[in-house]
Amino acid sequence: MKNKENVLSQHYEINGGDFSNAGNISTQIKETLKELGIRSSLIRRAAIAAYEAEMNVVMYAHQGQFQFSLTPSTIHFTVKDLGIGIEDIELAMQEGYSTATEELREMGFGAGMGLPNIKRNSDQFQISSTPGKGTFLDIFFYLNQREK
Amino acid sequence: MKLREIQKKLNLNVLTAQDHMETEVHSAYTSDLLSDVMAHAQGGTLWITLQTHQNVIAVAKLKELAGVILVNNREPEEETRNKAEEENVPLLTTSENAFHISGKLYRLLGIEK
Ligand SMILES: Nc1ncnc2c1ncn2[C@@H]1O[C@H](COP(=O)(O)OP(=O)(O)OP(=O)(O)O)[C@@H](O)[C@H]1O
Ligand SMILES: [Mg+2]
């Protein structure tokens, strides 16, 4: 890959189980994208992906790092966590599959739609995970592309 | 239709964001699953749910929903109410269940297939 000039880069820490701040990172990123005048259809997609990635760290990991960067051509999120990891990624990617606890389900989580939402709304998405260690997401949105 | 008018016609209680009731409401979405709302609700939508947890407000804010209606006389948790006030998300309650309030809103908004 060619080197691209970052126009903006933000780093956020996420604490597992911290439901009172959950969603704040996604909201901040959304505000930033708005201020920068990114088109609203793209902001909507990026906000959905950011939220779902952020929530999965809160739900399934101890600790995580959310890196947001913007170049002239892409919005890029990397989300890395230390947590239980995912045994079967193909299964986890299926809509409706969830290991959310009863407690989480009562709060409205556990539709098994988070990862599919990220995939559907992004232009490029990669996930890798080591069970017992953690999970890594690499999510891209292209600024100069026809709407999907 | 303005949220204020809907609130009056359907006799909803307003708990928060009294000064954000002039939003134009285009539609409503009834669901208790947060990721489902993330995926499918449009901006300017009223969200009908029984979820009272503060993450409801995070979703409403992120999706720029017009407001949230809690059904069955459900009371929001205190953090939910505080967060809704902070984020200017109108939180409304009704004694009706999700089916009835959805039906009334459907008729009121004149949504036809
Ligand atoms: N960061 C993560 N660490 C460990 N497991 C994860 C992580 N993200 C997802 N998973 C696993 O993949 C499953 C599916 O995730 P997905 O986000 O699609 O749905 P969910 O979180 O269960 O429910 P929803 O996102 O709809 O509230 C989860 O139930 C969990 O087992
Ligand atoms: Mg999820």
Image: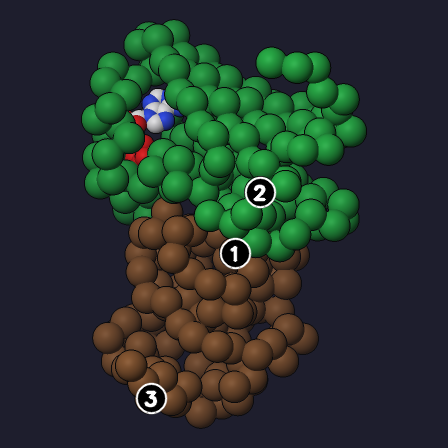
Chain colours: A green, B brown
Q: Are marks 1 and 3 in contact (CB under 8 Å)?
A: no
Is residue B40 or residue A126 the one in the foreground? A126
Q: Is residue B58 above or below residue A71?
A: below
Which residue is more in the foreground, B77 or A56? Answer: A56
Q: Is residue B11 above or below residue B70?
A: below
For badge 1, the amino acid type reads Lys
The Cα–Cα distance between marks 2 and 1, rounded to whole angstroms, is: 23 Å
Residue B74 visible to the viewer: no
Disc on res. A145: 2
Instruction: Categorize mark 3 by other alpha carbons within 10 Å: few (<14), some (14-19), many (20+).
Output: few
Q: Nearer the viewer, mark 2 or mark 1?
A: 2
Q: Residue B107 shows which numbered tag?
A: 3
How many C-alpha atoms fall within 10 Å of the one at disc 1: few (<14), some, or many (≥20)?
many
Of the residues shown, which amino acid type is indicated by label 3?
Arg
Q: What's the residue type where badge 2 is placed? A: Gln
**The disc numbered 3 marks a residue on which chain?**
B
- Whether callout 2 and callout 1 share a subunit is answered no
Point out the tag, 1 or 3, that comes first from the N-terminus.
1
Relative image position of residue A52 (x, y in whole percent): 44, 38
Residue at position x 31%, y 56% in the image: B32
User: Residue at 60% across / 76% down in the picture?
Assistant: B23
Q: Which residue is mark 1?
A: B63
